Image (tube, helix red, strand yellow):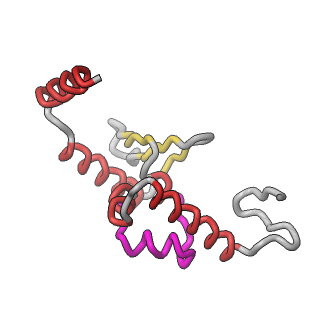
Amino acid sequence: MNTVEPGGDLPVGAPGPVVLRMMLGNQLHQLREAAGVTAEQAGYEIRASRSKISRMESGRVSFKERDAAASSSFSVLRFAEPELPDVAYIELLTTALYLEKREDVDHYMEVINHLSIQALTPDRTTRFLNEMTRET
């Protein structure tokens, strides 16, 4: 099968973007179910609703960069100079993104806040790791 760069033209005879979206969505649906992950859990991981997961898996909506980036490593860069905006730096498998739009950075700040709330305290982390090493 011919490969096409993102945003490039599809080869003659290749399935159109809607068909490709449906095929990708179907594959993601099968992988999610095989892993025993509910649509709610998948939505939580990418900060989306169960219905958005359903729409993505059925091919009714396109996939956004931020949907994939939600589960990637990221940092929010803040600078001492007030005129410099915060930047969300997202590491992907073969590249990285720098997002400067306020709404994008705010999205990643929400993720950081959520992780901070869910994280164990240092004492509980130590106990958790000690228990895990005793079990192995």
**Placement of 26 over or under 89, stated as above or below:** below
Q: Residue at x 18, y 29 (%)?
A: 128
Taking the image as shown, residue 113 lies to the left or right of residue 86, namely: left
Q: Does residue 54 show up magenta in the picture?
A: yes
Taking the image as shown, residue 89 lies to the left or right of residue 26, namely: left
Q: Position of residue 119 (x, y in %)?
A: 21, 40
Q: Position of residue 112 (x, y in %)?
A: 29, 46
Quadrant occupied by the C terminus: top left
Q: Does residue 43 show up magenta in the picture?
A: no
Q: Which one is nearer the viewer's eye here, 15 or 90?
A: 15
Q: Which residue is drawn at 14% across and 26% down?
A: 127
Q: Give the range drawn in magenta.
A: 47-65
**Placement of 97 over or under 36, stated as above or below:** above
Q: Which residue is drawn at 24% across and 26% down?
A: 132
Quadrant occupied by the N terminus: bottom right
Q: Farthest residue in the left direction? A: 123
Q: Which one is nearer the viewer's eye here, 61 or 8?
A: 61
**Toward which corner of the image does residue 39 lie, by quadrant?**
bottom left
Residue 102 appears in the figure: no
Residue 50 appears in the figure: yes
**Toward which corner of the image does residue 62 lie, by quadrant?**
bottom right
Q: Which one is nearer the viewer's eye here, 98 or 124?
A: 124
Q: Position of residue 12 (x, y in %)?
A: 88, 71
